[in-house]
Amino acid sequence: MAFDLTKSLERWLALGFIHDHQAQRIQEYEKAHRLHSSERSWIVNGFVILGVVVISIGIISQIAAHWENIPDWVKLMGSFLGLASLAGTAWFSAEKKPLAFDVALLFLCALCLGTIGLIAQIYHTTGPLYRLLFFWCFITMGAVYFARQLLAPWLWVGALLGGFILAIYEAPLFSRIEPAFTEYPELLGIILFFLCSIISLINVPYFNHNALKPAFRAWTLIIALGALALFDLNPNGHHPARFSLELSTAIMNGAIILYSLSVIAFLMLIFSQEYTKGQKIGVLLILLSFLCVAHMGILTSSDFWRAFFTILSLIFMAIFLAGIDCKRLFMLFLSLVGLRFLILYFQALGSLALTGTGLIISGFIIISGAFLWQKYRHFLFIWSHNLTS
Amino acid sequence: MTVNKKLLGAALALPIIVLGILTGYRQYAYVTGQDVILPISGYDPRDLLSGYYLSYKIDYGIKDICPPTPMPSSPAIVCLDPRAFVYGDTPPKGCTLFIRGTCESSNFMAGIERYYVSEYRGSVLEEKIQSQKASILLSVTRHGEALVKDLLINGKSWKEKSDTP
């Protein structure tokens, strides 16, 4: 049981063991002593951490320097011992030490990747990167499922999506539809966006209380922003007649079916979830504006319309995020809206902005934007929140 | 926080078991496969060593390997006894020893086109492969999987050769 000095002093004062000035002096002394000891422990801990890091780097350097001389079986044994130790650490810290548990899981996942590389090195095998990523995702799936911090699941979902993208372009399985994705990479952006959204919206009991769902949500936002940037700023996407390769009807039909199914699944999920009416309308507007930006490159070469729908899409996303109480993300999206407005200004008045007058006007716009942002961001958040709740 | 210990145990054991099986399988193929020696050549002398891996092209002794197809990547089989090449997953009739792989841009790839070397010996080995007769010693299983056992310079292990000046 922890010793509470303040309570003890109060009790001793009440009992008449000590006087007020003595109590005050004791408190002052203890306060100064505690500060000193915490400072000392911080310094000692700092040096201990530094020492451990230096020793670790030394061990790694020694292993690297003598890597060629270490027998293969020793390398494999070391790797498997490391895996077993990390699994053991995770097992014993699962209930009482959450931080140690998550760190052990993260290192376990990293060492799994290292061990796959080691096996490939020892047996001189090679293969496509997507296969490595899928294999790693498969063996670490369970470990990541139990993670409570976002980092390991976020990396895992990133590897899964990376594997999926590479497989589309490299795997023999997708070789028939691969030309559609090469000619029209926006299609991949749309499919990944819907795929991640659908997974992050699925309401399955086993999937609701771990960090995998937030990881998918984080990737949905990253993909949404990446896809919007690709649709909006891709210089090859401006041309309405940019399809140099004649795609067969079967490829296009396949792509359109896949695309439509993902959109329908997304809508069905959104409308089956317990969202408010405002949020559902918000999602529908995000979807429509997102699809408008994605197809604008085919319909028109106008910079204005692409910029218009990108800004609209970002505004709808920001409002939706405010509605679900994501204040920081709301701020991020709002600042991206401001940034896109600035890019639009430079796109529209590029030659003017290069002159002295243009630069002065640009400077004023940036300062005014920053001022308005500082003044009205909280008001906008509350307004957006009320709009969708 | 309560955790389902059985599920957690299974989740933590899965990567160790799977990687253990993979290692065991590789070792089994390495030990039980049939030894085959095939000549190799560096396909791009300017970039023979990529990282710590020596990349090379294997000469299977078949003239029309990976003829053009509309597909960018297709599964294929190289028969070593007798020498033949076919697209698909089934080896040709009468083939007693074969390697499975894929045809990518007119190249037959079986996952054995790289050999790990240390950065210290890399340049020496690269020079030897350019100037002397190089080949690889493979272990080929009856299911068509191949593993590289050694790199040979003039018929001897490169490790023996690099020790002598």
Image (cartoon, coloured by chain):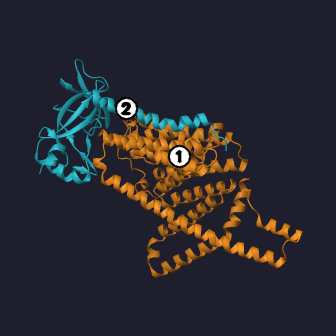
Q: Colour of chain A?
A: orange
Looking at the image, residue B108 sits to the left or right of residue A32; the answer is left
Q: Please, which chain is the residue tagged with disc 2 on?
A: B
Residue B129 appears in the figure: no
Q: Position of residue B125 (x, y in %)?
A: 18, 49
Asked if A315 appears above or below A276 in the picture, the reply is: below
Q: Residues within 10 Å of mark 2 (few under 14, many from 20)?
A: few
Q: Secondary structure at mark 1?
A: helix
**Amino acid at pointer 2:** Gly
Looking at the image, residue A376 sits to the left or right of residue A300; the answer is right
Per the image, the residue denoted by label 1 is A105
Q: Residue at x 38, y 47 (%)?
A: A243
Q: Secondary structure at mark 2?
A: helix
Q: Please, which chain is the residue tagged with disc 1 on?
A: A
Along the viewing direction, whichever of B45 and A264 lies nearer the viewer = B45
Residue A276 appears in the figure: yes
